Image: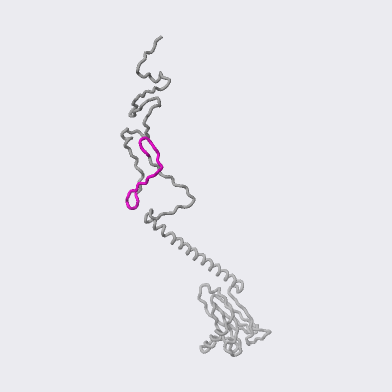
Amino acid sequence: MPVVDKTDKIAPRSALRYRPIAEETGTIGRRTFVASGQGPRVTRASRLQSRQTDMNIEIKEWLRVDRDGQKNIHTSTNTRRTSGFTKTLPKKRPMTATRPMIDLKHLTPQQQKTYQKSPVLYVGLGMLGAIILWSIIINVANWISIVHDDLQYGRPRTYQTDQVVGHNDSASSPSHFLVINLNRHIEIFEIQGGDPAHSKVYNGPQLLGQSDDLTPATLSFADVNGDHKPDMILHIQGTEIVYINDQGGFRPLKASEHAEVERFLHDHPQAP
């Protein structure tokens, strides 16, 4: 039976049931390894490069250029160890429920100008909204007023009343008065004693406004000159126009009567 001679040389791996304690060096490509009982110690690398490069390589950190043109190096405590060097990892942004405060110092001049103008923008939008709301309120109020006048005076605007003025009339048969706004022109009709055969027409003022064709006109009666006869007062757009009862009809004021009539109207406000 052949016997293997003892030798100081290390037997091949394939013939051993365990790895020898002695170290064995070898080279695979550009990499050098040392074999021992604890296993091979092989230098790990993430990419192919020379040993000299592995030892001297430096990872450049992220740089940021601020508005002054200076480079600020942003470091992080979150690091990871790789073969031969330490790689810096960016910090993770914490999840917060509230919106972080904005520091205007780190913004560009254009961004700072935008943030500084934002309150003015909100104030302008608020004023615009108030103007729009006010316009809507005014339009709704005007619409309500027009609807009310339509129900009360109709179209064209018409006002009617009865009054004893001493023109072929009596308490049992008063005169009938009719005021009509015909295309911005006021017409006053008097039917004396309720008899259409004794009718008179008085011309009122001409209205010039665009929507004045929907303005109602009303009448009231009072003795404004002290002759014990009721005079006719026309009310329109907050203005009072007096017609004097004279000779079976009504006439406009004379120049000498204006002061006396104005004094009377001031002392005795007339309801329309």
In which image quadrant can residue 272 be found? bottom right
**Magenta-drawn stretch contains 73:** yes
Q: Residue furthest bottom?
A: 227
Q: Give above or below for 43 relative to 271.
A: above
**Left or right of 4 on screen, residue 152:** right
Residue 3 placement (x, y as % from top left): 39, 11
Work out which quarter of the rendered image holds the N terminus and state it: top left
The one of 185 and 258 positioned closer to us in this rendering: 258
Residue at 59% over, 87% down:
223
Q: Is residue 87 visible?
A: yes
Residue 259 placement (x, y as % from top left): 52, 87
Q: Residue furthest right?
A: 172
Q: Give above or below for 182 relative to 14.
A: below
**Left or right of 224 on screen, residue 25:** left
Residue at 39% over, 23% down:
21
Please state the extent of the stretch shown in magenta in the rendering. Answer: 65-86
